[in-house]
Image (cartoon, rainbow, N blue to C red):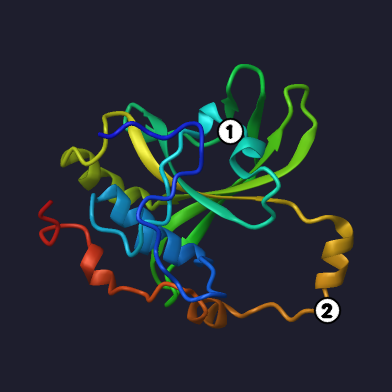
Amino acid sequence: MAPMETNEFPNPNPMRLPPGFRFHPTDEELVVQYLKRKALSRPLPAAIIPEIELRKISPHKLLGGFTGEKYFFNLRETKGGNRKVGGFMVGTGRGYWKPMGTEKPVMSSRGDELVGTKQILVFCRALGSQTKWVMHELRLAKNELPYIASNNLVASGKEWVACRIFAKRRESMKRRGRSRRPLSSSESSSTSCITSLPDEECSIGEEVTS
């Protein structure tokens, strides 16, 4: 497995998109079209999400003054085949990611299938005070893990997760945005800059030959 980048935001083979397009996947798209394919060693729709070892880099180094969302793949540890749920330290006393609430289900657009889970975390300084940095950590549904482990698609004791990291908006920005009508789930999905690929292409089982 190639070494993971730890000191910059890599951009291998960037996808050439028309001006004005942004990478803004829904939770379902991020799990099914990107995370699931990553875990199965399948080709991704676009080489747009880098691998980062988040335990080694604080969010302000990853994002700096960037005000939008950035996406990363991160290898999380598992213990005895069971996934670890919760926060983790960053560097040597730099701070830690603290989970807020419990994991939430990520359902298919049809609403009848659990495709993954989402945990919200906030980055805290070493003394416990919260910062502006927020992370959405998305995982595959647990029923996907045995196949991945049995076929040695990831290092033993590890699990790929997809992370969406951004800075919380200031209160004044929130007030200005309240008058804007939020997109419905169908509208949000239709405005993705990546064309949705058939779920069958990344299904678990005999179709996976790599």
Q: Given this view, does label 2 or label 1 mark the residue nearer the observer?
A: 2
Closer-to-camera residue (66/203): 66
Closer-to-camera residue (109/153): 153
- Asked where in the image residue 78 lies, by quadrant, the reply is top left
In the picture provided, is 77 more to the left or to the right than 188? Answer: left
Q: Which residue is mark 2?
A: 179
In the picture provided, is 39 more to the left or to the right than 53? Answer: left
* Neighbours of disc 2 within 10 Å: few (<14), some (14-19), many (20+): few
Residue at 43 percent across and 50 percent down: it is 11
From the viewer's perspective, is residue 161 above or below residue 130? below
Residue at 62 percent across and 32 percent down: it is 58
Closer-to-camera residue (146/122): 122
Q: Amino acid at mark 1?
A: Gly
Residue 70: x %, y % from top left: 56, 52
Residue at 24 percent across and 63 percent down: it is 202
* Neighbours of disc 1 within 10 Å: few (<14), some (14-19), many (20+): some
Q: Secondary structure at mark 1?
A: loop
Total residue callouts = 2
In the picture provided, is 88 more to the left or to the right than 202? Answer: right
Residue at 50 percent across and 43 percent down: it is 9
From the viewer's perspective, is residue 94 above or below residue 141? above
Residue 174: x %, y % from top left: 83, 64
Q: In the drawing, what numbered circle is on residue 87?
A: 1
Cα distance, mark 2 to mark 1? 34 Å
Which sits earlier in the primary sequence, circle 2 or circle 1?
Answer: 1
Residue 68: x %, y % from top left: 65, 58
Q: Secondary structure at mark 2?
A: loop
Q: Amino acid at mark 2?
A: Ser
| Quadrant housing the N terminus | top left
